[in-house]
Image (cartoon, helix red, strand yellow):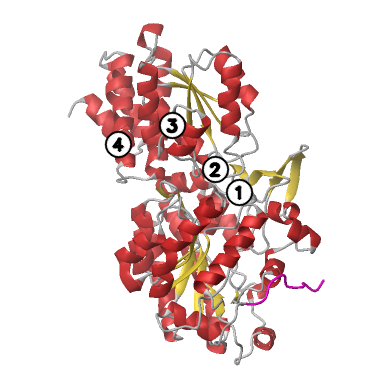
Amino acid sequence: MGIFEEISGALQQGRAPKVKELVQQALDDANSPKAILENGLLSGMAVIGEKFKNNEVFVPEVLIAARAMKAGVEVLQPHMTDADAVNKGKVVIGTVKGDLHDIGKNLVKLMMEGRGLTVIDLGVDVSADKFVDEAIANEVDIICCSALLTTTMNEMKAVVDLAKQKGVREKIKIMVGGAPITDTFCSNIGADCYRVDAASAADAALELCAG
Amino acid sequence: MKVQPLREKWKGTMTDRERFNNQMHYRSVDRCFNMEFGYWDENFREWKMFKDNGIKSNWQADVFFNFDRIETIGGNTWLNPGFTTTVLEETETTRTVRNGDGLIAVEEKNSSSIPHYIKSSVVTPDDWKKVKEEMLNIDDPDRIIDVEYLKENHPEDRDYPLCVSCGSMIGKIRDMLTFEGLAYACYDYPDMVEDMVETCCRLVEHFLDQVLPHFDFDLASGWEDICFKNGPIVSVDFFKNVVTPRYKRIRNKLDRYGIDLWYTDCDGDVRPILPYLMEGGINCLFPFEVNGCAHPAELLNEYGKELRIMGGVDKMALGSGRGAIDAYLKTLVPLVERGGYIPFCDHRCPPNVPEEDYLYYLDLKEKMFGMK
């Protein structure tokens, strides 16, 4: 088994110390940080994402795999140059105003990072103003809004409306998600994309960023 | 304050107890058992009928709507004493607290929804050892049940179903460690988490041993809340290997006292762990979230009469107008006719449901499943 497969396998098992050790070994063997990131770490997360979509693994496995990826990235970070950066797109993500629930939002963030997207996390209880202002300031491709409550999901429409009002709606895609959200709701408020789970959302975000 | 009922109790020819037991055991009934799970705190502040009549709690609302009666006896099966609740920071809309489970959490002042958990007080086996010694002592006199008092309150000739609570094997641990904390702990300290589950089980057994010989319970209940929209928040293997064997121990005790019906309160998509819940002896789901899982018919068809469901009225339909309420309740007719199913809102009813539509739903439910 090659070093990249070993990294990917250890990551899928959530073995953070092993991932760190293997990433260091791969660097010592003169593999480029970009190759280690793409062929080892991101490749492992892609497998976990696929298994998550297929109900072969569940949230705990995703969390420990993501923790292992983070451990590997920390080893890589000092060796990365601009040329090594994996720049597949940029997203701002947050839970909408009035809602403090972040489990789903955090999962989507982990999955998006695992697919090589840069994710700016605005946290919970995020106003429409903040979503749109941060999206403009950071020149993102996507605004990603999460809500758990039936009472807060309509805040997503405020984000869509504000993006229109500020003249950036054509440039920035808007994704929505969370327990009460459906495709119909997504269409009704004029958002671009809803996916049923975090891994599918990350896949969709990649596609949206690729245009 | 004495609550004045808003509505007549549904007409019937059976006692609530006879009706509940017959319905959940596929025998003939005069009508469907009439119950609801409750309401968000916001409903008590916002719905005019609650405000005008001083209804501020779910038990008051049960009397207000004149639902059929069902009661539960529970024990002291968790941290005692708990962590001291402390307010660490306060803003106009939120409050950061260390709660009774030792969690630092941000709560919204005007919402009854789940708080935003930031940090647990229990992370390592050393933390757990301290908590176990100081707060989970099985010989704590506070864990002794006043059986005579309970017998006075729930006499043998009662006309309502009486439920015995079997607590939680993993849900309270999730509460103590946080969602992410539990996932990491299962991987980093599996022996610690198993010891936590074992401790929960022993405390529940200790309670059951005190009450089971003294009451003719109609059902057992439990609480886990261990799933969300995309499945369980513990690994299926962990659930199967660590939690299910403890359920089996509880099931053995219930069997000795003839209690066959046992529900657990678990939100979200329970399907991946349902075979292991059932292997452990749990045979009823409550309040069965439709949007987070499936239509109740899907699971009742798949598992047949081995599985019962309480709940399963889609809260999204209740908030989508009368046409949606009509259409959804029609889908439940075969399930109510089949038995082993009691319809009610699939969690606490949220405040986005207009109160007029809620009353319409109650009326329609009576028309369809009562004797009106």
Q: Are marks 4 and 1 in contact (CB under 8 Å)?
A: no
In the rendered structure, the answer to whether residue B170 lies left or right of residue A152 reads left
**Disc 3 versus disc 1: distance between alpha carbons?**
22 Å
Q: Residue furthest right?
A: B1
Q: What kind of element bears circle 1?
A: loop
Q: Are marks 3 and 2 in contact (CB under 8 Å)?
A: no
Q: Is residue B253 visible?
A: no
* Residue A59 position by quadrant: top left
Same chain for the residues under marks 3 and 1 in the image: no
Nearer the N terminus, badge 3 or badge 2?
A: 3
Residue ID for mark 3: A110
Q: Amino acid at mark 1?
A: Ile
Residue A148: image tag:
2
Q: What kind of element bears circle 4?
A: helix
Residue B17 coordinates in the image, percent (x, y): 55, 84
Residue ID for mark 1: B114
Highlighted magenta segment, given as a residue range: B1-9
Specify the subunit that label 1 lies on: B
